[in-house]
Image (tube, rainbow, N blue to C red):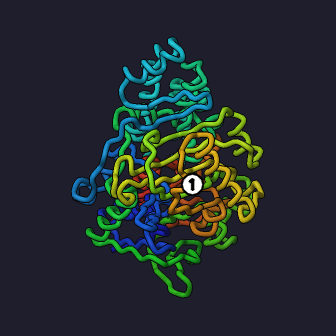
Amino acid sequence: MKKLVVIGAGFGGLAVAIRLQAAGYAVTVLEKNRHVGGHAYPLEKNGYKFDMGPSLITAPPVIEEIFNVAGKKLSDYLDLIPLDPYYRIYFHDQTCFDYSPDSDAMKKQMAAFNKRDADNYDKFIAASKRIHDAVMVEKLGAQPFMKWRTMLSFAPRALTMGALKTSYQFASGFFKDFRHRFIFSFHPLFIGGNPFKSPAVYQMIPYLEKEQGVWFTQGGMTSLVQAFRQLLEDIGGQVVTEAEVTQIAVNDGVAGGVYVGERFYPADAVVSNADFLHTCKDLLPATARKKWTDRRLDKISYGMSAFLLYLGVRKQFPQLKHHTLILSERYRPLIEDIFIKKILPDDFSMYLHVPTRTDAGMAPAGCESMYVLVPVANLQSGIDWQKQGELFKNRILGFLENHFGLAGLLENLEVCEMFTPEDFLHKNNNYYGSAWGVEPKLTQTAILRPHNRNEDVPNLYLVGASTHPGAGLPGVMMTAETTAAVIQEDMPI
């Protein structure tokens, strides 16, 4: 059997390992940390359970396919729970909106703000469907964009669909009210992208969510990670934790294994689910990189980071849904502060994940497990989080209690853990502390993104957020499908 080594047990690494093990390769996954999952790391303290990263599941069929290729059923490993509404969105003017799959409910809420926008909702969903069908049904998202002819053949169709506009431009073509322009353009933020720069190809997400739902798993997202690990081991794959890869061995110009300290793991091919810049700069010798030189790597735009609080509270807050967004008055200017100016502004928008709204087992009885995510600039900002972390934490907690209305939050706080961009750098090897890696913008999409097959070193492949098609759980699952197919083509059993 051909031996393959996968660096990193995030969703992408585990998914590609399952596909390749099921196809007849002998796969070993090496993970730096004590638990698998990458960003989807579990945290448990004082009876409170938290998902430290991804917090929702979209496109269940993409995940189910991974179980199917291994001859198993997703339902044998996981219990998926549908959410409705998907998100509750609070705006600065005290209005709120429940984002759901119910078209009539959506249009009724929209009509209260702008009747014409409500009338355009179905047209927007139809336009979103056209992009969705190209990416998901025709599997362009799982097709390697490594040749210009592939890119150029898709370009005319992309133009016709409006997929090369920015996400915000796409939404603005249908909606006038500021609420609707946010509601139908914010999704790139979930994958570390700027809605004012990310291509409208990501506008497939509203249709995807509407048709396939937004889901949670019993026990939190870590249960999906554990299911992937169990599935891989059930079909003969191996996972080794606390095994940080320190070097990719390049022999005669070809990847031939990896080192974990002084221990060598030989392999016929290596797949990296690690951060792209970390893979190139820290794991490969500079002499092996002809295209991805340090100079070129330094020109890559990396996405934003995130400041996170994990809160265990001795009371519950019914005004919070499972997913709640609380928005600043500023949209574009705040995004520019984060992505372009790279500063820490006085205001912020935030996303709250409250899994106890769906799964009471995530906290002690009558209590609330919450995580708060605030988008912030990556470490290219120069922000010193050793100094700013506590100050920023207190600003957020004060806002939630005194301005948003979570009365009693501070006096009932039993757990308060903080995760900053510096933690993304040091704990996950994410360059610049970016939570999502290579920024999803037009000039870093498809063929312009790092390829699934590394361009410098034969038998080295990439999977995960920084390769094609990109970040987000469905995107990462598709990178696994794409990369596995390329490996099988390059080195058939």
Residue at 65% x, 59% y: name it.
Answer: 421
Residue at 45% x, 18% y: name it.
Answer: 123
Q: Is residue 261 left or right of 37 when viewed as pictured?
A: right
Q: Measuring from the top left, give residue 5's x and y in whole percent.
A: 44, 72
Q: Please tell me whether mark 1 sits on a helix, a strand or a loop.
A: loop
* Residue position for label 1: 410
Q: Measuring from the top left, give residue 60's x and y in whole percent.
A: 33, 46
The vertical placement of 105 against 297, above or below, is above
**Quadrant (top left, top right, bottom left, bottom right) of the C terminus:** bottom left
Residue at 41% x, 37% y: name it.
Answer: 86
Location of residue 224 (image quadrant): bottom left
The amino acid sitting under disc 1 is Leu
Residue 75 or residue 287, whichever sits in front: 75
Q: Is residue 491 left or right of 201 when viewed as pictured?
A: left
Q: Measuring from the top left, give residue 253's x and y in whole percent.
A: 59, 72
Classify mark 1: residues with Cα within 10 Å, few (<14), some (14-19) or many (20+): some
Q: Is residue 476 left or right of 94 when viewed as pictured?
A: left
